[in-house]
Image (spheres, rainbow, N blue to C red):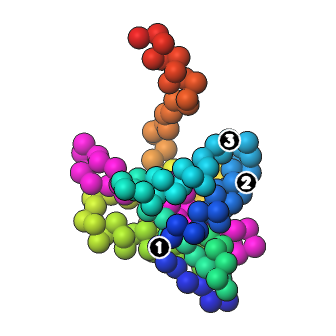
Amino acid sequence: MKFTIRFAEKNDVSAILNLIKKLAAFEKEPDAVIVTEQDLLEHGFGQHPLYTCFVAENNEEIVAIALVYLRFSTWKGKTVHLEDLIVNEEFRGQGLGTMLLDEVIKYGYSLGVKRICWEVLDWNEPAIKFYESKGATLLKDWYLVQMNETQIQNYIQNL
């Protein structure tokens, strides 16, 4: 198979959202996705884009994505955060993950970032092995901390 990697375009948001929902199902949270196509359009292709997305195509069908955004580290400076690298299940094991990760790393390098970071679930052994094989470091002494919308609202109400 021949795959093409390119920057996402506005007309790709439906396929991007479809892959995001597939990832949520894989991660055992099929109802957790609340982002919409409109959100993806507005926040990725609007006046002030919040993310950049790479898509992988096979016969003009989007079969994988890597969605990234810029962050700032107080220790390192400009950083790229890889939010999700998603490969459609039937296309796994064919080098697409590597191709997309290569693009993300080249993108970060072109921006002069000091770090590229992402998270991986502790039970996702294939992904962990993949990232380690690429030379990435897994920081096992850090916790991922989040507040969901309800927690944010509760926090604000208690100020």
Q: Identify the residue at horizontal 50%, vertical 60% (top origin).
A: 67
Residue 145 image point, x, y percent: 49, 33
Mark 2 surroundings: few (<14), some (14-19) or many (≥20) residues within 10 A: few
Marks 3 and 1, Cα distance to the nearest angstrom?
26 Å
- Looking at the image, can residue 122 be seen? no
Image vertical order of residue 151 relative to residue 43, above or below = above
Q: Are marks 3 and 1 in contact (CB under 8 Å)?
A: no
Count the marks: 3
**Magenta stretch bounds:** 65-92
Mark on residue 137? Answer: none
* Among the two numbered marks 3 and 1 on one chain, the one whose residue lies closer to the N terminus: 1
Residue 33 image point, x, y percent: 66, 45
Q: Nearer the viewer, residue 88 or 11?
A: 11
* Among the two numbered marks 1 and 2 on one chain, the one whose residue lies closer to the N terminus: 1
Q: Which residue is mark 1?
A: 7
Q: Identify the residue at horizontal 51%, vertical 29% (top origin).
A: 147
Disc 3 secondary structure class: loop
Mark 1 surroundings: few (<14), some (14-19) or many (≥20) residues within 10 A: some
* Among the two numbered marks 2 and 3 on one chain, the one whose residue lies closer to the N terminus: 2
Q: Which residue is mark 3?
A: 32
Q: Please, what is the three-letter code of the amino acid marked with disc 3?
A: Ala
Magenta segment includes 88: yes
Indicate which label's residue lies in the foreground, 1 or 2. Answer: 1
Q: Nearer the viewer, residue 133 or 68?
A: 68
Q: Nearer the viewer, residue 132 or 116?
A: 116
Left or right for 87, reference 79: right
Q: Which residue is mark 2?
A: 26
Q: Please, what is the three-letter code of the amino acid marked with disc 1?
A: Phe
- Looking at the image, can residue 1 be seen? yes
